[in-house]
Image (cartoon, coloured by chain):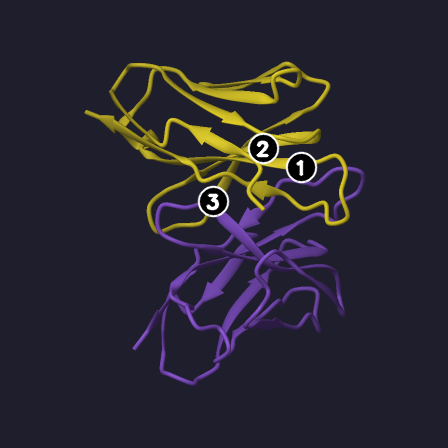
Chain colours: A purple, B yellow
Amino acid sequence: DGGITQSPKYLFRKEGQNVTLSCEQNLNHDAMYWYRQDPGQGLRLIYYSQIVNDFQKGDIAEGYSVSREKKESFPLTVTSAQKNPTAFYLCASSMRPGPQNQPQHFGDGTRLSIL
Amino acid sequence: SQQGEEDPQALSIQEGENATMNCSYKTSINNLQWYRQNSGRGLVHLILIRSNEREKHSGRLRVTLDTSKKSSSLLITASRAADTASYFCATDPASGSARQLTFGSGTQLTVLP
């Protein structure tokens, strides 16, 4: 079955630590996205990538970093500079946007908490 | 920035009743998409309606779009307990430097058995 796999499901970060969230897709999608969701709120875009070796900042990129070395993979690093990292992180992918943005397929998320 | 805003924030109905959720937005769009999120899970795409369409159906779902009022509604007919979830609208902006989907804050639907 094609889909998006996020790991781990739960992650704990210590003070001053960087942590990396994994996102892998086998949908052959060009575009991938990272969102942050806080309780009772919508999704906010952290970073997105429309093609391998290229990525763009979203609305709340500060304190986060990404890489896109392979089409299938788009890992997100939450750095120690992100002072409030506790949230639910969602990865998504879509066919490469043309004149219009395409529907996005989501993984089941990683819940990050501070120890 | 958030463009789509859903109304109401929460909705509780009995099984078998219809549920209507609304989404308002501020700028011109190419399309509007509705998603569903079960608790603790990722979002699932439900339906996409383009700016030149007024109504779309998919099973028990009916979506309308009024571009003059910059609003959309999602109707779920004959609701079931399994429809309990959060529902989000996402707008595809027609202009702007970073044309990415922007999601609203969602409507939490509870269907009571």
Which image quadrant for residue B77? top left
Which image quadrant for residue A97? top right
What residue would you read off at disc 1?
B92
What residue would you read off at disc 3?
B43
**What is the distance, in whole Å, between disc 2 and disc 3 at their CAs?**
12 Å
Chain for numbered disc 3:
B
Q: Amino acid at mark 1?
A: Asp
Could you tell me if the residues under marks 2 and 1 are in contact, i.e. CB atoms within 8 Å?
Answer: yes
Q: Is residue A93 left or right of residue B17?
A: right
Question: Mark 2 or mark 3: which comes first in sequence?
Answer: 2
Point 62% across, 67% down: residue:
A74
What residue would you read off at disc 2?
B33
Residue B56 percent location from the top left of the image? 59, 17
Depth check: give the residue in front, B33 or B98: B98
Question: Mark 3 or mark 1: which comes first in sequence?
Answer: 3
Q: Is residue B60 above or below residue A90?
A: above
Which image quadrant for residue B20? top left
* Total numbered badges shown on the rendered structure: 3
Mark 3 or 1: in front is: 1
3 and 1 marks on the same chain: yes
